[in-house]
Image (cartoon, rainbow, N blue to C red):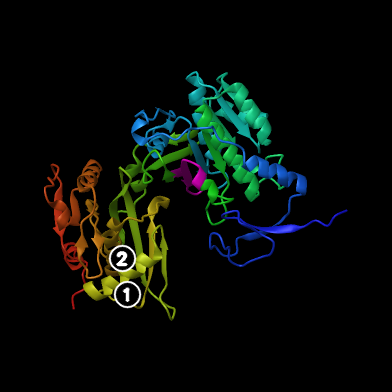
Amino acid sequence: MAKQKTIYVCSECGYETARWLGKCPECGNWNTLTEQEAVSAAPAMAEKKLKRAPGVGSEPMRVDEIPDEAMLRRSTGIDELDRVLGGGIVEGSLILVGGDPGIGKSTLLTQVSAHYAAGGSRVLYVSGEESARQIKMRAKRLGASASDLFILPENDMTIVERQMERIKPDLMIVDSIQTMYCPELASAPGSVSQVRESASLLMRAAKISGCAVFLVGHVTKEGSIAGPRVLEHMVDAVLYFEGDRQHQYRLLRAVKNRFGSVNELGMFEMTEDGMKEVKNASEVLLSDRAHNESGSVVLCALEGTRPLLVDVQALVATTVFGNPRRMASGVDSGRLALLLAVLEKRANIPLYNQDVYINIAGGMTLDEPAADLALCVAIASSHKNRLIGAGWAVMGEVGLAGEIRPVAQTERRIAECSRMGFTDLILPHGSLRGVRAPEGVRLHGVTTLAEALDLLGLRVSR
């Protein structure tokens, strides 16, 4: 019997080499080469033949000869999902949905399948992990009993492709892409070559037939999609489910979308009847806010076109360690260190001997500059142990010189604050040009961080 040879394959880009390397020469990532069995000669020929398969035989066209046809979109029946996708599902699109186990990926896609099937469209649900009976139990719990919903418990891509040609579905769910395999390849399901080839077959089938395909993807412990990075480049959209499985709220975020914005955010609540949309996300995020404690301030963040009111919390306490601790949840730790330096230098707030803890309530992650001023105000409030009024909201970008820079879409933020009952808003002075305050709302324009803290009585005098 011939000796079995092994090769090393990069889990990020699929680069193959005969020996182990610490750094992948192709993508430059470290410690991504994993040992795998080399394919035998016969399957290797099949793999080469499969990769060299012809495309659809298109002819080159002049750009001015291409017809201007609008993309055909169809609603998923779930407004929050439509928002994240940019208005609905585009025909022939390939969409990757990732998230932790038990976060609600299969539940949400089962609800989408039920809506499609109830509208007279054919849906093929391919499962490589669950049996047909398990899927039926979930579908029954969610009220999905349409006759045009077909279940296929299979992970052989040749059979899946054959059934797709026979049924001709309008929507197809593959749960999950890491369990699919091509018999022509000798590697195991979930390997780089299998995931890449399976996704390539599904992409080709989707573009030719016009069937929209959802791929469910496993995630690694770091939170990224498991498998080669090329998988995310092949698909048209990548959606991530965020949130804690122990809590009922889930956030759906697009990190790639060829047919819409990547800044949109959808919010859901996990219930016994499936994923329920959260229409008023600001009310939910502020529902448990502590009104009688220092270190809490409201910020109007912007996720795509959607304004959200979030509770920014800070806790400042004298350290008992040699070096003070700085911990942040939902905020970049590097940005926090920068703002602490600005507070010490420009606002005369001594924090060199203080532990600082930051939390964004509701599991939100803030990465926009408009959160800077709210973070500084929350830290100063906790350090001074002085409450911020319940009707106040703060937003603005803080520069290294302590200046407050304008933020985008000011009127939309003001309207959301007014709708939720906030009466005093601190904003950058440069953002108030041409802006009219709603009835009952007072706008306070500031140009420096010290001016904003003085307005709230939080600055420590020299």
What residue lies at 27% left-to-right and 67% top-to-bottom? 380
Instruction: Inspect the image, locate mark 1, and give the three-letter code of the amino acid beneath it.
Output: Leu
What residue lies at 38% left-to-right and 60% top-to-bottom? 331
Q: Provide the secondary structure element on which disc 1 rests.
A: loop
Classify the position of the C terminus by image quarter: bottom left
Q: Which residue is mark 2?
A: 379
Q: Nearer the viewer, residue 290 or 21?
A: 21
Instruction: Inspect the image, locate mark 2, and give the three-letter code of the amino acid beneath it.
Output: Ile
Residue furthest bottom as drawn? 322
What residue lies at 71% left-to-right and 48% top-to-bottom? 187
User: Is 173 situated above or below 178?
Assistant: above
User: Is 372 situated above or below 190?
Assistant: below
Magenta region, residue range: 233-253
Q: Nearer the viewer, residue 210 or 425?
A: 210
Q: Residue 324 at what x, y percent from top left? A: 40, 75
As measured in the structure, the alpha-carbon distance from the residue carrying label 2 to the one carrying label 1 is 10 Å
**How busy is the neighbourhood of tag 1: few (under 14 within 10 Å), some, or many (20 plus)?**
many
Residue 243 lies in the magenta stretch: yes
What residue lies at 22% left-to-right and 72% top-to-bottom? 347
User: Is 96 situated above or below 25?
Assistant: above
| N-term-proximal mark, 2 vs 1 | 1
Res. 80 mark = none
Whether residue 299 is visible here, answered yes or no, is yes
Q: Which residue is mark 1?
A: 351
